[in-house]
Structures are given as C-alpha cells and as structure tokens.
Amino acid sequence: MRLDKYLTKAGMGSRSQVKEYIRGGLVTVEGKTETDCGRHIEETACVVTCRGQTVGYQKTAYYMLNKPGGFVCATKDEKDRTVMELLADTGRDDLFPVGRLDKDTEGLLLITNDGELAHRLLSPARHVPKQYLAVLSGEPSPQQTAMLEHGVDIGEGTLTAPAVFAWKDRQRLEALLTVTEGKYHQVKRMFAAVGCRVLALRRLSMGTLLLDERLAPGAYRCLLDTEVDSLLAVTGLKEPAPGHKEEREHAAE
Ligand code: URA
C-alpha cells in the first residue's frame, strides 16, 4: 500500500495532512526519513513512524469531531448532512458516531468502529458523565438549579438522575450542566422543566474525553493513545494506567 494511504488508514490524518507530514520529513520507514508519498509499505512488515509515533494499521479507530450545527448524528440520512460526511477522508468505512447530539448541538462527538466501547459509554447503567455548555434564555434561580441537581420531571413520570450545575459565565447566561443519562433532548428538556430555554448547546466532555478546543467546528482528529486508554479504563475494558486513581475507582463500580 502507498505510504500516504497507509498513514491515512492508520488514523494519522487526512490524505492531504499526511502528505504534508511526509513531505515535511516527519515520517520514517524502517528508521529512515521518507519523503516519497508513494513509497510502498508492506502493512505487516514495515516499521513506520509519524510525528514520533509508531504507526500500525489499527483494527479499532477513534476520532474526536467538533460537531458543527446543521449536521445529524447518523451514518446515512435522506434529508440532512451527516457527521460522517465530515470524516469522509479517513479512508475507513466502518465508523459510526457514539450516541446522538441534536442537529443544532455542537461540540464533542466520538466517532469509532469500537462497538463495545460505544455500547458501554452509552449504557444507562454506567452513568458516564457528559458535560454541556448551555446558553440560556434567562437566569434560573438557586431553587431551580437545585431542582436540576436533584432531578426533574421531563415528562417521563420519573425524575432525571442527579446532575451538576455550575455557571461558566453568569453575565452571559452560560451554564454548565453535567448529566449521566442520555435521554432524547435531555439537557434542553431539563432546563425547560425549570422554565429556561436553551438557546445554544455544546458538549464539552464525555467520560474522561474532553473536547479539544483547538479543533475548529467541523474538524476532527484521532484520539491520543492516552485518551483511548482512559476511555477504555473508565468503561472497564482495560486496566487503568498506574496512578489513575479516579479511573480505577470508576471502573470498579
Ligand atoms: N441534550 C440535548 O438536549 N441535546 C443534545 O444534543 C444533547 C443533550
């Protein structure tokens, strides 16, 4: 396989990005810098590094997308553009978004082909925390924020699980809400239950994964090994790295 294709398939970046890395001298093959994008790579035999990282064709792939508004979280849609169109140059056809953000919601979206991790991250039993930044139409009172934290009725006959509310910027009515469930329109319905409208919504984190603020809306990148390890650890799919006390405790739950 061509070197540029190999690096793209291994998740090192888009075809044009990896070509830049190769031409910029950031890629080695068998220990020597390689600047020829068309260099033939024996997938199972060659040792390749890109930007100091050893590369191998990965069975599992993990990407973080900064979802822009106007895209739906689906692999196919008759009517709307899908988030997968934003990852068209990964060279992979086995990816899917982990869970759904509304069409107008922005921010962190994990895209992978790892079904088991996705299943665990979305499982209601695991209570994986997700933090959202919501721009509100008005200021909730301390009683209303206490209700959000305690749990509110969003029309399902039961209360939502306890959430954590904080102000990011009170003047601008920018609030942070951390929830551990993933019900349809959950954050918007929770604020609506206490009389506030959400004017804009952005996801900032999912479990241990934080939105990389350097990603422009619509841009994506591969997860770092440390980010993958930490997600696998909090979902009990891998032993936590030594020293990661919180992950060890969460995995034991
Ligand atoms: N809650 C919502 O209301 N919308 C989202 O997209 C995600 C969480």
Image (cartoon, helix red, strand yellow):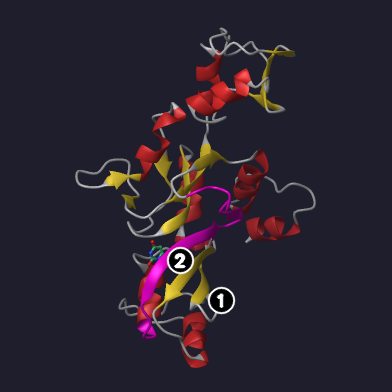
Q: Is residue 204 magenta?
A: yes
Residue 208 at x, y = what percent?
Answer: 61, 55
Badge 2 element: loop
Q: Is residue 3 magenta?
A: no
Instruction: Give the left or right position of residue 166, taking residue 106 as reference.
Output: right
Badge 1 element: strand
Decide: few, some or many residues near mark 1? Use Cα within 10 Å; few <14, some 14-19, many ≥20.
few
Identify the amino acid type marked 2: Glu
Q: Earlier in the sequence, mark 2 or mark 1?
A: 1
Residue 127 is labelled as none
Residue 117 at x, y = what percent?
Answer: 51, 45
Identify the amino acid type marked 1: Asp
* Residue at figure coordinates x 34%, y 59% from the top left: 102
Residue that label 2 marks? 181
Using the image, determine if residue 112 lies above or below residue 163.
above
Which one is in front, 210 or 230?
210
Residue that label 1 marks? 169
* Residue at figure coordinates x 75%, y 54% from the top left: 244
Residue 32 at x, y = what percent?
Answer: 73, 12
Query: Is residue 158 at all visible to an observer of this figure?
Result: no
Chain part drawn in magenta: 193-216
Residue depth check, mark 2 versus mark 1: number of the one nearer the observer: 1
Instruction: Give the left or right position of residue 137, taking residue 170 as reference.
Output: left
Which one is in front, 208 or 174?
174
Query: Tag count in the figure?
Result: 2
Q: Which quadrant of the frame does ligand 1 lie within?
A: bottom left
